[in-house]
Amino acid sequence: MKKTLLFLLIGIGTPKLVAQSTGYWQQHVDYKMEVTMDVKTYQYHGKQELVYTNNSADTLRRVFYHLYNNAFQPGSEMDMRLQTIKDPDGRMVTKTKVGDKEIKESRIAKLQPNEIGYLHVSNFKQDDVTAVAKEVETILEVTLAKPILPGKSTTFTLDFAGQVPVQIRRSGRNNKEGVELSMAQWYPKMAEFDFEGWHADAYIAREFHGVWGNFDVKITIDKNYLLGGSGYLQNGNEIGFNYQDKDVVVTVPKKQKTLTWHFIAPNVHDFTWAADKNYLHDVVPTNFGTTLHFIYKNNPKIIENWKQAEPKTVQLMEYYNKIVGKYPYQQYSVIQGGDGGMEYAMCTLILGEGTFDGLVGVIAHEMGHSWFQHILATNESKHSWMDEGFTSFIEDLGLNELADKKAENPFAGSYKSYINLANSGKEQPLSTHADRYDENRSYSIASYSKGEVFLAQIQYLIGKENLMKTVKRYYSEFRFKHPTPNDIKRTAERVSGANLDWYLTDWTETLNTIDYGIKAVEGATDGVPKTGISLERIGRTPMPIDILVEYTDGSKESFYIPLRMMSFEKENPTPEIARTVLKDWAWGNPNYTFEINKSKDKIKKIIIDPSGLMADVKPENNSYEVK
């Protein structure tokens, strides 16, 4: 395994844009930043030049930036949210026992001035003319010196000063595993403007949305630190680092106290980096054109796990390339840092001291986000289920692919979580903004589990082959764009020919649930060997119905009831079992009856949805069995 820090710049071409709808457009940014980090005070200052291109039909008179670090201050909106939500994130609170009661207190509320995070902007200019910039906690509101006309570009310049907060959430300093700098959401970041308008959401520890563009970043820091993150390092030879198993050997002149790391990240919507004096760095080439980098602490307790995780990561990326589409960058980095696992452009920050299976599991998820969020860049604040859920979908497929024993339904855990939430009375629609969930648990299960079930259940609706074709086509047509829920639905419709608008509406915009049941099984009374089966739709959400009948002689037969509003007939998912296609079921009639040409005493078992891919919230009435 080669140990070096030579990151090659290999250009990434901008793909041809395929319209989501007639007249699709998206904004564009080009960042140039120079920042100097003081590792003693954890304060940094820098300059930013941003060329902003307005591809919309609107004339823009204001723009907005995110100043995420300002959330890490007592009294901030993030702090208030921690103090009022029923189930605050355990990483962001301290817990103390008072008698039999556990008291949870916001860690942000207790931060001292030298521990808080901040990010302040000064000297803001547009094309060398001063513009009015107003800081409103985590948002910078800028009144432009001159409007930006449709199709025109302008250049913004600014100075910024920041302080890295103690590790509270995602970004920060000196996390619990000793990583010194996890630099995520650290710079003034342009908010996105799209067909819906501006998305200048305050930061309360949820999700992100960014503008596609190119980053040219120079980071000056103490010479003893090793850096990794987004982009391709331009000056590996110039900064003169070599890596050994135990020690970082500095080959720069002794009088030189700092080094400047120069990165270029093409066609991304974020830029993240991490730094530590005690990092090891492994470089793993692959046969599919992407070099993997693993950057982790020189801790004897974790090195073996990280080394063993490297070939698993190669396998996972190769599998994702196969089932979704090729990862378009020539580099990806797995970096120990942060406070759990979080995806960023061309890299992830993850904790690294857990079990081997846990490490691989987190890598499988966070790397999966490279497809669903960092290439298919949904607005995850509004549609968190599209990035978290779809990533969980390929994560479970990937881990199942690596497993010695394959599961028949690798999504079963997410089905179970969703059904528990749906029956709890605490579910909110998937259309809920990520910041507006009443509880963190409801947000997590909705985004990760119900979002995953959205895709897995499409397999139940149109078949596995059509689902996987849908995933590939969705990636091909919407990569490097901001797809919306309608885009994945329309892609599935184009692939299969089915009508699925009802599914998108019920599953994402309502709390409607699926609940079908076997109402009655009745033998014929005239001596004819027939059995009548009565079904009922109890929930509001309609579904086509797969039914498996097992007979006492060991034979099996399946039946398929198309859903009328789909105008579609699914191919037999179990061709080894003979299937009868019955007349369709219209939603307006909650009852349905059909006959089997065998007497009731020949029937051993009847099962609705033997695959387990229909998320029926009351599965106990889905089967009839003679015991």
Image: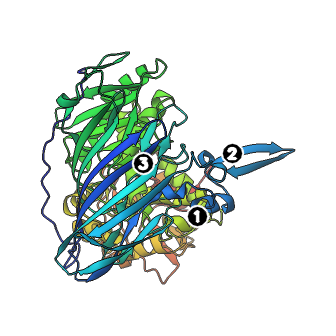
Alpha carbon distance from label 3 to label 2: 60 Å
Identify residue type, mark 3.
Answer: Ser
Viewer-nearest of labels 2 and 1? 1
* Residue 475 image position (x, y, % from top left): 24, 58
Q: Residue at x 46, y 35 (%)?
A: 180
* Residue 520 image position (x, y, % from top left): 59, 68
Kindly check if marks 3 and 2 are in contact, taking CB atoms under 8 A apart as contact.
no
- Picture colour scheme: rainbow
Count of marks placed on residues:
3
| SS type, badge 2 | strand
Q: For mark 1, what is the residue?
A: 77
- Looking at marks 3 and 1 on the same chain, the residue that comes earlier in the sequence is marked by 1
Q: Is residue 432 visible?
A: yes
- Looking at marks 2 and 1 on the same chain, the residue that comes earlier in the sequence is marked by 1
Alpha carbon distance from label 3 to label 1: 63 Å
Viewer-nearest of labels 3 and 2? 2
Kindly check if marks 3 and 1 are in contact, taking CB atoms under 8 A apart as contact.
no
Identify residue type, mark 1.
Answer: Glu
Q: For mark 2, what is the residue?
A: 94
Single out the residue that lies furthest toward the front. Answer: 255
Alpha carbon distance from label 2 to label 1: 18 Å
Q: Can residue 604 be seen in this view?
A: no
Q: For mark 3, what is the residue?
A: 555
Packing grade of label 1 (10 A; few <14, some 14-19, many >=20) is some
Quadrant of the rendered image containing residue 263: top left
Where's the N terminus, which quadrant? top left
